[in-house]
Structures are given as structure tokens and as C-alpha cells.
């Protein structure tokens, strides 16, 4: 079975500071990994995905994530936070062989302070 | 661009009522999903469907059922709504399973 743990349900950064949102996964087979973002009163949008190609994945809005097999991690980063990045972020895992269902983490609420 | 629509953004129902939540996608996707989202719990899969008339239980199917009579439409049914089913419900669809596209969500309150 696969699972995802997001460390920190709330993260607060200043505008212009580094954003780091942590995600660790467990999977018995090679995983596909995803980061989704949810802005207030909206559904989820895909930020980026890892599907066993390059370990450093670039997504939309300046976000990127690095797949580290040795650490079973897929942390999301952005060098400089913008006020518009305030949202809830979800990490999700899907075993490569499992078909289409995802397992989501608990979510991390990002606050960006002026 | 893929569009997933949900029939209501906000819904208020009484305990014991039968509730239908509708989801429609316009991209001919085989796979459709229903999740509920609760603070601190993330998204939990209720049911999913990989084809017309096909369904599989997710992680929390108790108290719910689903219907998929047409490829574009996936309905979630609460047979007898209870207050612990107050939640945000999200529908999603995907093709080949790599990327899921989400609807805007239905916030259901059961009183």
C-alpha cells in the first residue's frame, strides 16, 4: 500500500522568501508523485508531476520538486514566494502499476506575509 | 481545455434526506472519482469508476453509492444523509490515469 505524509499542516513565509513544503511517501513499487494546489473556493490544480523521468521536476508558477529515492521524499520548493502563492498544497502518490487512483497527503496551508 | 463541472457549489440538506451530487466532464475520460475533503485529513477517495457502469470502492465508501450510466457523468448518492457527511466533495476525471482534473467542489452541509 502507498501513503503520503506532509510535514507541517501550516507553513508561513514572508513575501520573497524561499518556500519549502515537505512530502514523504511510502510505496512498495516505483511511484508517480504529484503536487496539487487549491486556491480558496476552487478545486485542485496540478502543479507538477514526477513519472520516473528526470528527478528534478519543474512545474507552473515557478515551483519545482525533486524526487529523492534514498530519502523517499518529494519536497516542493519555490525560490521567492509571492502573495498569490497563498493556498493549500497537496502531495499525492500513485504506484506506477496501479491504474489511476491517487493517495493524497493531509495538505499544507501556505500563508505568505507581506 | 478539460472542464469538470459539479451541479452545485453549496448544498444544505436535512438529516435522513437522499442527496445526489452530479459531476460532468467534457473530455471523454474513462476514469472518474469522488473524494471528500476535510480539514487535516486531505482528500479521501470515496468511489471511482473506470468505465460506464463500472465502479470500485475507495477508502471510505460507507454511506455512499455511485452511478455511472453515461461516460461523461458520475453521480454520488448519499442514501440517508447524516451530519458526519457534512464536507467538501470533489469530483475528478482522468485519461490513462496520470493527471486528474478536478471540479470546483460542492460544499455540503447536513443539518
Image (tube, coloured by chain):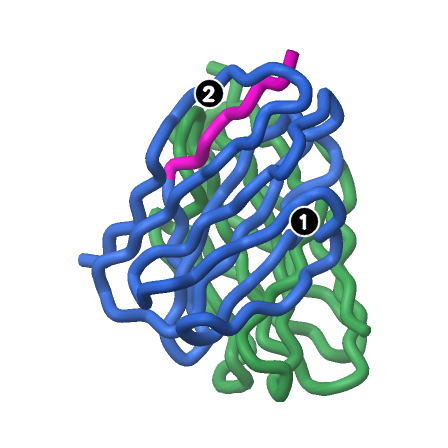
Chain colours: A green, B blue
State left or right for residue B63 relative to residue B103. right
The spot of residue A27 in percent (x, y) is 77, 76
- The label on residue B11 is 2
Taking the view exactly as shown, the residue that stands out farthest to the left is B1
What is the quadrant of residue B1 in the picture? bottom left
Q: Which element type, helix, strand or loop, lies under badge 2?
A: strand
Q: Closest to the observer: B79 or B94?
A: B79
Is residue A83 at least partly visible in the picture?
no
Taking the view exactly as shown, the residue that stands out farthest to the top is B111
Q: Closest to the observer: B69 or B2?
A: B69
Q: Which element type, helix, strand or loop, lies under badge 1?
A: strand
The spot of residue B99 in percent (x, y) is 42, 67
In percent of the image, x 29 and y 61: which residue is there?
B72
Disc 2 crowd rating (10 Å Cα; few below 14, some 14-19, many 20+) is some
User: Does the CB distance between marks 1 and 2 fall below 8 Å?
Assistant: no
Looking at the image, residue B53 lies above or below residue A45: below
State left or right for residue B26 relative to residue B69. left
Q: Closest to the observer: A2 or B32?
A: B32
What is the quadrant of residue A74 in the picture? bottom right
The spot of residue A25 in percent (x, y) is 76, 65
Which comes before the other along the chain, label 1 or label 2?
A: 2
Distance from Cα at disc 1 to Cα at disc 2: 20 Å
In percent of the image, x 29 and y 56: which residue is there?
B25
Looking at the image, residue A61 lies above or below residue B72: above
The spot of residue B12 in percent (x, y) is 51, 15
- Span highlighted in magenta in the image: B104-111
Q: Magenta: predominant secondary structure element?
A: strand
In percent of the image, x 68 and y 61: which residue is there?
B58
- The label on residue B44 is 1
Amino acid at each position: 500500500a502507498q501513503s503520503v505524509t506532509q510535514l507541517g499542516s501550516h507553513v508561513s513565509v514572508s513575501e520573497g522568501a524561499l518556500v519549502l513544503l515537505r512530502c514523504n511517501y511510502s510505496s512498495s513499487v516505483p511511484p508517480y508523485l504529484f503536487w496539487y494546489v487549491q486556491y480558496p473556493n476552487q478545486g485542485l490544480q496540478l502543479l507538477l508531476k514526477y513519472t520516473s523521468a528526470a528527478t528534478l521536476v519543474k512545474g507552473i508558477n515557478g515551483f519545482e520538486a525533486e524526487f529523492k529515492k534514498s530519502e523517499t521524499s518529494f519536497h516542493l520548493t519555490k525560490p521567492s514566494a509571492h502573495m498569490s502563492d497563498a493556498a493549500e498544497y497537496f502531495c499525492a502518490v500513485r504506484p506506477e502499476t496501479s491504474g489511476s487512483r491517487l493517495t493524497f497527503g493531509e495538505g499544507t496551508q501556505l500563508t505568505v506575509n507581506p | 481545455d478539460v472542464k469538470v463541472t459539479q451541479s452545485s457549489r453549496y448544498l444544505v440538506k436535512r438529516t435522513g434526506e437522499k442527496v445526489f451530487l452530479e459531476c460532468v466532464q467534457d473530455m471523454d475520460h474513462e476514469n472518474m472519482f469522488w473524494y471528500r475533503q476535510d480539514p487535516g485529513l486531505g482528500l479521501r477517495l470515496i468511489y471511482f469508476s473506470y468505465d460506464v457502469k463500472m465502479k470500485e470502492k475507495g477508502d471510505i465508501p460507507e454511506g455512499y453509492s455511485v452511478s455511472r450510466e453515461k461516460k461523461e457523468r458520475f453521480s454520488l448518492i448519499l442514501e440517508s444523509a447524516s451530519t458526519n457527511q457534512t464536507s467538501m466533495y470533489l469530483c475528478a476525471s482522468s485519461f490513462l490515469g496520470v493527471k486528474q482534473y478536478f471540479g470546483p467542489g460542492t460544499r455540503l452541509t447536513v443539518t
